Image: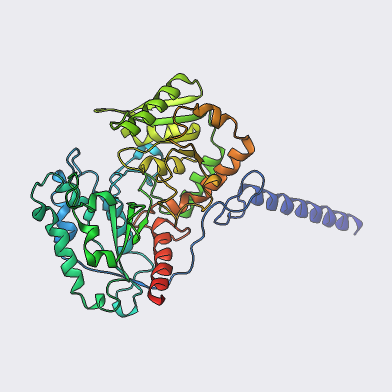
């Protein structure tokens, strides 16, 4: 009996030990799934944006195809310098970039945000197909593609014709009458200056879309607003190359940008410019960066260039703590959003490159995510001397702020059914809803 008891005890001890080892093995080999957030090495809370509750409140007009889809049939002629056919593919995302390691990367053209926004709204969880339930009315006119097609049209009447037709069409819709168009909005993928041709001014090929009275009643979401005359214009991000479908893809990228090694203090990707002020600032930046061992310089020009290769652009930015962002042909640069995507702190030389543009997207305190060097007063001062004085802990804090912003500056893949974070379209709809509600009450 004692022997049987001893054997039973030994068996019980072995069984308990075996089960303990088994559960430990399960725990370490298959840890609990992580929530939709990540922490940095100090255990700081999530750096990604949570998606707010959304009711069905956006009605998308089914416009005659001449205002959007018909334009794509002329894709070879939509840009004076580029065949746009590859760029308008995949709902404006452009061609896939398989060498980037996932299906979330595309060679997205800087002026296709209006197409991507439309593709997102087609399947957006805020969309309603009943106009009686709508708080907002989206007019999906591809105005940017149209104006670039007609830049060289010398006859102003012909250049303005489609914009006038859109204005007349939308003004006659029954839902326009409800608030005289104040709850309607357009999304435009080019800068405001392309749609505000003034009488007697220099003709750069613009039309008058944004000066038409019905359009001035609407809200216009645009990649660069007019800081002085754009009261109904609201800045939205230029589309970069990353269009994730899931929260997991976003978190993986954020984690990588938080931890990646950055051997260079600063970098510049760009080309010289004409015009006295632009040329002066650009030339000085090119000179200073070229002379510094702590700056990574990529010169752009005509023909083949690393500047037009998304993987090369992001590689440079992910190797840098700071990315120089002087104004280009316009105040704003798509490169600003490339640098934010890469966790690279932007250095601005004009307040209109970001601070007066993207109030819905960027923090009210510009010092929390960027550096400002006055391009007029301090153009000849050494940029490196300014940047090297910024403490490491301040740089790390700014980078964490930027990485926190990445989801809301990104255009999610239009086919995504995973709503784990708030993207650029979600931010626009939420902010516009509040803006229109306030405007209608006043």
Q: Is residue 279 above or below residue 94?
A: above
Quadrant of the image occupied by residue 388:
top right
In front of the other: 350 or 94 = 350
Quadrant of the image occupied by residue 171:
bottom left
Which colouring convention does the figure follow? rainbow
Residue 409's spot in the image, x, y percent? 43, 51
Residue 93's spot in the image, x, y percent? 30, 48
In front of the other: 180 or 122 = 180
- Number of numbered discs: 0
For residue 310, side relative to residue 367 (left or right): left
In front of the other: 415 or 234 = 234
Placement of the N terminus among the 4 image quadrants: bottom right
Q: Going 43% across and 38% down the picture, which residue do you hit?
A: 349
Placement of the C terminus among the 4 image quadrants: bottom left
Residue 17's spot in the image, x, y percent? 77, 51
Quadrant of the image occupied by residue 302:
top left
Q: Going 14% across and 64% down the picture, which residue do you hit?
A: 165
**Which residue lies most toward the right here?**
2
**Which residue lies most toward the front here?**
200
Q: Going 44% across and 55% down the picture, which residue do you hit?
A: 359
For residue 46, side relative to residue 57 (left or right): right
For residue 356, side relative to residue 261 (left or right): left
Q: Is residue 227 above or below residue 350?
A: below
Residue 316's spot in the image, x, y percent? 43, 31
């Amino acid at each position: 009996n004692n022997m049987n008891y001893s054997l039973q005890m030994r068996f019980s001890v072995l069984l308990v030990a075996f089960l303990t080892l088994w559960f430990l093995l399960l725990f370490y080999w298959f840890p609990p799934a992580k929530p939709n957030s990540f922490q940095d090495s100090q255990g700081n809370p999530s750096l990604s944006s949570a998606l707010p509750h959304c009711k069905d409140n956006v009605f998308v007009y089914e416009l005659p195809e001449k205002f959007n889809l018909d334009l794509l049939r002329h894709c070879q002629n939509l840009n004076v310098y580029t065949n746009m056919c590859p760029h308008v593919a995949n709902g404006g995302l452009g061609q896939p970039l398989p060498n980037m390691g996932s299906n979330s990367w595309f060679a997205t053209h800087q002026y296709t945000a209006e197409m991507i926004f439309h593709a997102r709204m087609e399947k957006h969880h805020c969309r309603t197909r009943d106009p009686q339930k709508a708080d907002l009315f989206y007019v999906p006119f591809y105005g940017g593609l149209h104006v670039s097609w007609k830049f060289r049209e010398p006859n102003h009447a012909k250049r303005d014709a489609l914009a006038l037709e859109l204005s007349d069409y939308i003004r006659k819709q029954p839902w326009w009458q409800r608030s005289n168009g104040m709850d309607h909005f357009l999304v435009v993928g080019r800068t405001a200056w392309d749609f505000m041709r003034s009488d007697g001014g220099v003709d750069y090929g613009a039309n008058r879309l944004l000066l038409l009275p019905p359009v001035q009643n609407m809200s216009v979401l645009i990649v660069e607003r007019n800081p002085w005359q754009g009261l109904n214009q609201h800045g939205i991000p230029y589309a970069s190359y990353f269009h994730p479908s899931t929260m997991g893809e976003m978190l993986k990228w954020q984690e990588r940008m938080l931890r990646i090694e950055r051997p260079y203090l600063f970098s510049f990707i760009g080309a010289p410019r004409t015009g006295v002020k632009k040329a002066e600032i650009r030339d000085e930046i090119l000179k200073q960066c070229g002379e510094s061992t702590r700056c990574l310089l990529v010169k752009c020009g005509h023909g083949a260039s690393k500047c037009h290769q998304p993987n090369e652009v992001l590689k440079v930015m992910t190797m840098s703590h700071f990315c120089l962002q002087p104004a280009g042909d316009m105040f704003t640069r798509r490169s600003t959003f490339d640098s934010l995507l890469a966790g690279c702190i932007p250095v601005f030389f004009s307040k209109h490159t970001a601070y007066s543009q993207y109030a819905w997207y960027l923090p009210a305190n510009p010092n929390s995510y960027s550096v400002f060097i006055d391009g007029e007063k301090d153009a000849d001062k050494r940029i490196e001397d300014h940047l090297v004085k910024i403490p490491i802990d301040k740089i790390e804090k700014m980078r964490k702020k930027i990485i926190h912003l990445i989801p809301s500056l990104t255009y999610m893949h239009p086919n995504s059914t995973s709503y784990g974070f708030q993207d650029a379209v979600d931010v626009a709809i939420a902010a516009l809803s509040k803006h229109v509600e306030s405007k209608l009450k006043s």
